[in-house]
Amino acid sequence: MTSHRVRDTMTTKFNFWNAHTLALLACAFSLLLPATVLAAEEEKSEELEYSRGSRMCMACHKEGSDRPAHEIYMTTMGIAGDPDSPFGEGNHGCESCHGPSARHIRRQPDGSRLPPPIVFDQRNTAEEQNAVCLDCHQTDSHMFHWQGSTHDLEASACVDCHELRVADDPVLAIETQPQVCYECHQEQRAQFLRQSRHPVQGATASLSHVGLMGCTDCHQPHGGPGPANLIRNTVNEQCYDCHAEKRGPFLWEHAPVQEDCSNCHSPHGSNYENLLVARQPYLCQQCHIANFHPGGIYSGFGLPPEGQDSRLLGKQCMNCHTQVHGSNHPGGLRQTR
Amino acid sequence: MKLSSKPRFTWALSGLALAFLTVPTGSWAQEEDSDDNQADKKKDEPSTIVSEVNVGAYYSGEDSDRFGKFSGLTDEGAELQLDFRVEKRPDAASSDTVRWRLQGWRLGLDSRRLEFAYNDQGKQKFRVDYREIPNNRFSDGQTPYRAEEPGLWQLAPGWEVSPGSSNILGFTNLQDSLIDLKVDTERQRLDLSYHRKLSAAWRLNVDWKHETKEGTRTVGGIFGFTIANARGAILAAPVDWTTDIVEAMIEYATPRLQFGIGAYASFFSNDEETFTFQNAYGFRNGWAPGVEFPDSFGRMALEPDNSYLQLKMYGGVNVTRSTRLTADFSVGKMDQNEDLLPYSVNPELNVHTPLPRNSVDAEVNTTMLNLRLTSRLARRLGLAVNYHYDDRDNDTPRDVFPFIGGDAQDQPRFELGRINLPYSYTKHRADATATYRFARAARFKAGVEYSDYSRDFQEVSDSDEFTWLAGIALRGWTHGSLTADVRQSRRDVKEYNGNAPLIASHLPGAIDDDEHVNNPLLRKYFLADRDRDELRFRADLVPSPEINLGLAGSYAEDDYSESELGLTRAEVISVTVDAGWYPQERVSLTGFYTREEYDASQAGNSFFNPASPSFAGHDWFADAEDRVDTWNVALTFSDIGAGRGWNGIDLGFDYTYSDTRSDIAVTSPTTVTAPLPTLKAELTSFTVWGRARLSSNSSIRLAAESAELTSRDWALDGVQPDTLANVLLLGQSSANYDLWLISASWRYQF
């Protein structure tokens, strides 16, 4: 009860302009914070030496070794002819990302080796790792929304999703990409194994679940302008990319449709046909309770052999209200035509 | 064996071949130029061209539309398996920067894909991607209709209706008239994208998507109503759609400042904009004279041509070393100006009021603004502040349409006409999230969010929602990690006017101000007051390098406590267990289990008296329970026997099980109800595969899959075309299959 009262109080006191005020105050605070204070908190970096080049690295990290890295030359990062590549002329190859690693090359008295200054695992924080990647990639178009995005706030590291030392990064191919996303998005992994789903590769070897589209057909994992990191501005704009026939604008619109497709559809997978979030006629009755058939009681008595109710059989409510996304017929007020 | 013979596939292939021939030529020229200009660079060495082909066959033991719904593996028998890849990668030591790849997947199936990607790194990129995406819905439908033309369906020759009968009982030769009906669609999608680096900071991105979708989809064709009793038939309307999307952006990016400006244009066209169908029924009291078989028809307007143009801008600046400000802004216009159809296709009907305008003239203006400020306030403290503005301003003209709900009755009086409701909305949202790193890889976050929503012509014109959230993430330990998030929001509705759309859609004075269609106690769930609680956690444990375990769960509850009728409560619980065991370097056993529970409760009222000052509350309840269990276990052995005179064999086993059950209990304190059967879909798939390397560059792969789907759907099972008295159905059954499938292929790399 107490928490409920607290919430009530917060809600009644919090209005739209308060939200703006909060946002403005936060902005002002962050802008005015002296940069010198921030600089003072930065750790001083230790003077480190570069080794004699990546060939030395490959002497150990060769094909068949415990930590092979030879396929880096088969990736976009290994293009020597690109001056912006880590392996471009004047750059430091492996050490462009791992940092000056002469100390790593030299064995310690006990025979072990110190790690390079930056390693892309839990020995460095996600921020430390990502700073290396952003050093080159922060100006990429798809990285524009990265800072403050969901994955940034979750402290996801680039290498949580990207495999850098293989010729073909699995997250960049629509057939293998979902398996990478499923590592964290486990509910979606289960949803894509349902009977009503988009044709995204399921977490199965079954040929019934081949991947014809990828997660990135809709989502921009580095941050997008829309909700849930969608590529487009709104849920509907995203859906219209492939379902433009539902965009209209129609003469007779259906308000929840034009507002948000996910009012009625579960995009990753559903127990119900056409990705509906609930079963007809009950889904429709969550918004239409009127006399006669919209408010009717539809129980097992409407099924054969006890009965034959048109709201329970066939396309159910859509036996008649078939143009539920909007109608362009002058008689289509009730989405029947 | 089925091979592609589709002309569109052929032209797509031709286009790809053309691209293949033209673009690399230019690039090779650039390679030479590059050498000339960079004489001090290393001498070019031969680039690596790798080609790979995978050829074989699938053999399915049974027809199944559902198994091959998206893959195209629908028919019993053999299908060609063909994949290939030709790839050129620059040699590591050369100054060559050009990489290209031509790749094809499933070329023998309807789900084929071809891609050509060309990348002159640091200069330009070009990509062509062609995909076919089938959607096989069912092929066991039955109908007495014949498609004379795609948009005109007529009844079978010899169709008869008993005199005096106005429902399906009067269809005397229905059974003899039925023919099989397949309902499916296929998308053919071509994506072209071009990216060019114009200078160190400027670049150009252009994307074009051309997609066609052809086939049929089911619709309910209605001939007429008397009160709420319709006469209709489920039909397969033509789908002949084309969508073109062009997006072009010019961008400037330096480490400190980025901005871009561009345009997005989407054009949809439908080659079949009307669907006309012959009336199968005899005359019904209440219909206009002459509206009966054989001379009357029903007609619906199919999806209209439309377009969406959008101007887009974005900008971002690193204000200080630790503070970044970004903005997205776009304005757009959706247009649709299809000619309006007449009120009825049947000339027998009395139509006294002409259409108020000749075409729809629909126009929606959209505006979107995102502002984001992110700042690292201190080494451990970060802040992200967002403001979002989203406006849909529908400028479609409003007119009175004395509408005919079917094609069977005369037009009502003008005063009873209805006015179209062009919906508009405006949404503001502001949020702030702070993250604090209290240990090397441990974070706490907390945030607030406030949104304000206003709408036109709906029951709720103003609502707002306040949310707070908190989360903790403990990562960075060798043996595991833990994350947990909690989020709570409350949506408040200023006022719920249940008859606002009804009043707005009538002429002033045409109905009383207190008249309602929906029960006034109803609260539509997407508009209603709502309390939402969400909890999410995930724990990963790696007790040893050979074992990893994961446990994740989420809980979400929507409480519509102010809603007496409509959705009153919804709850989702999900738990997942993941495990991986790697006893040896070349052996892995992985699996997961997910349990999801969806519960939803709603209340309804079957009849209320609009004249009564007090309206009746609920007299029925529907409680839905969805239970989903999903399993997957995969065991893989790699390189068995490698180095012992063998080239090595890989073996794998994969077991997938998904069981979804939906129970809906409808109860009433005043009416006797009967239980509804469980809706069910149980999928079991077991795949075993093996791959033997014949040499360093060739291998064979054999796979066998046993797959079974058992589904039960009370809307379809046992339902025949004539089960309903007033709607002629297709009689298709719910999806079921029990099949085996084998595949054999040879992969060769050269």
Image (cartoon, coloured by chain):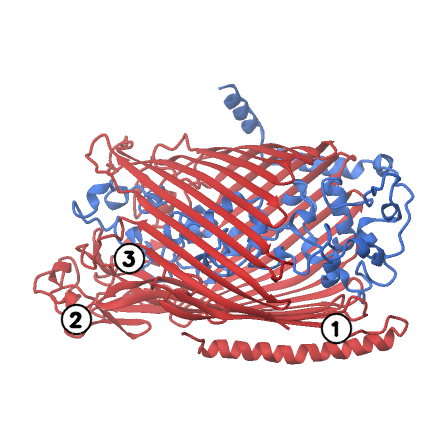
- Work out whether residue B183 can be spotted: yes
Q: In the rendered image, which residue does mark 2 sit on?
A: B294
- Please report whichever mark, 2 or 1, sits nearer to the chain's N-terminal start: 1
Foreground tag (2 vs 1): 1
Which of the two discs, 2 and 3, labels the residue nearer the N terminus?
2
On the rendered structure, is B541 left or right of B229? right
Q: Report the quarter where the C terminus of chain B lies.
A: bottom right
**Chain at tag 3:** B
Packing grade of label 2 (10 A; few <14, some 14-19, many >=20) is: some
Closer to the observer: label 2 or label 3?
Answer: 2
What residue is drawn where x is 78% and y is 34%?
A: B378
- Location of the N terminus of chain B by quadrant is bottom left
Does the CB distance between marks 2 and 1 fall below 8 Å? no
Kindly indicate which chain is depicted in red in the rendered structure: B
Which is nearer the N-term, disc 1 or disc 3?
1
Between the residue at mark 2 and the residue at mark 3, the CA separation in whole angstroms equals: 30 Å
- Against B352, is B15 above or below? below
Residue type of the residue flagged with mark 2:
Pro
Marks 1/3: CA–CA distance: 77 Å
Q: Say which element carries label 3.
A: helix
Q: Nearer the viewer, residue B576 or B52?
A: B52
**Chain ID, mark 2:** B
Numbered marks: total: 3
Q: Which chain is blue?
A: A
Identify the secondary structure beneath mark 2: loop
The tag on residue B414 is 3
Marks 1 and 3: same chain?
A: yes
**Residue B659 position by quadrant:** top left
Q: Which mark is residue B154?
A: none
Q: Which residue is mark 1?
A: B47
